Amino acid sequence: MKRILMLKTAASAACMTFALMAGAQTTTNSTAPSGSSESVGQHVDDTTITTKVKAELLGAKNVKSEHIHVKTRKGVVSLTGTVPSAEDRDNAKEVVEGVSGVTSVKNHLKVSAAG
């Protein structure tokens, strides 16, 4: 009987700890990053767009995307890094423009002459 009571107490303590940790994460994440006015929902949407963009770039046969970095802010996708040719740079922008949720693309990709 004592063992069952002890297990129930331990389970209750674990549940309380989990709930408190989850609440702390929610509070931390609801604060806008870097003092910006971005909401949690917008941050999640931007993260989703970034993930979709990266997946599309990796799947695109006409873009060598190993050195492309993607950031999204309020639907605006910024591409940075290097690509082997101007054609890859243009193709990357075209691929990104076709992704759902992207409002515009800032293409800062540089053409690398490295062979």
Image (spheres, grey):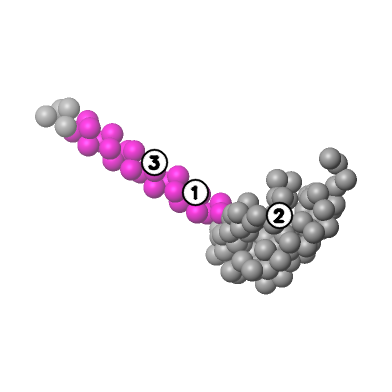
- Give the secondary structure at mark 2: loop
Q: Are marks 3 and 2 in contact (CB under 8 Å)?
A: no
Q: Amino acid at mark 1?
A: Ala
Q: Are marks 2 and 1 in contact (CB under 8 Å)?
A: no
Q: Earlier in the sequence, mark 3 or mark 2?
A: 3
Distance, label 2 to label 1, CA atoms, is 41 Å
Q: Earlier in the sequence, mark 2 or mark 1?
A: 1
Q: Amino acid at mark 2?
A: Val
Mark 3, residues whose alpha carbon is within 10 Å: few (<14), some, or many (≥20)? few
Q: Earlier in the sequence, mark 3 or mark 1?
A: 3
Position of 108 with respect to 95 (left or right) is right
* Front in this rendered view, residue 50 or 93: 93
Q: Is residue 4 above or below residue 77?
A: above
Residue 27, position as x, y percentages in the image: 52, 54
- Give the secondary structure at mark 1: helix
Q: Mark 2 = which residue?
A: 63
Give the residue furthest to the top.
Answer: 3
Position of 74 with respect to 26 (left or right) is right
* Front in this rendered view, residue 2 or 64: 64
Label total for image: 3
Which segment did they paint magenta?
Answer: 5-29
Mark 2, residues whose alpha carbon is within 10 Å: few (<14), some, or many (≥20)? many
Quarter in which the N terminus is drawn: top left
Mark 1, residues whose alpha carbon is within 10 Å: few (<14), some, or many (≥20)? few
Q: Mark 3 = which residue?
A: 17
Q: Mark 1 = which residue?
A: 24
Position of 115 with respect to 16 (left or right) is right
Residue shown at the point (70%, 50%) measured from the top left: 65
Q: Amino acid at mark 3?
A: Thr
Residue 79, position as x, y percentages in the image: 75, 57
Quarter assignment of residue 35: bottom right
Give the residue furthest to the bottom.
Answer: 103
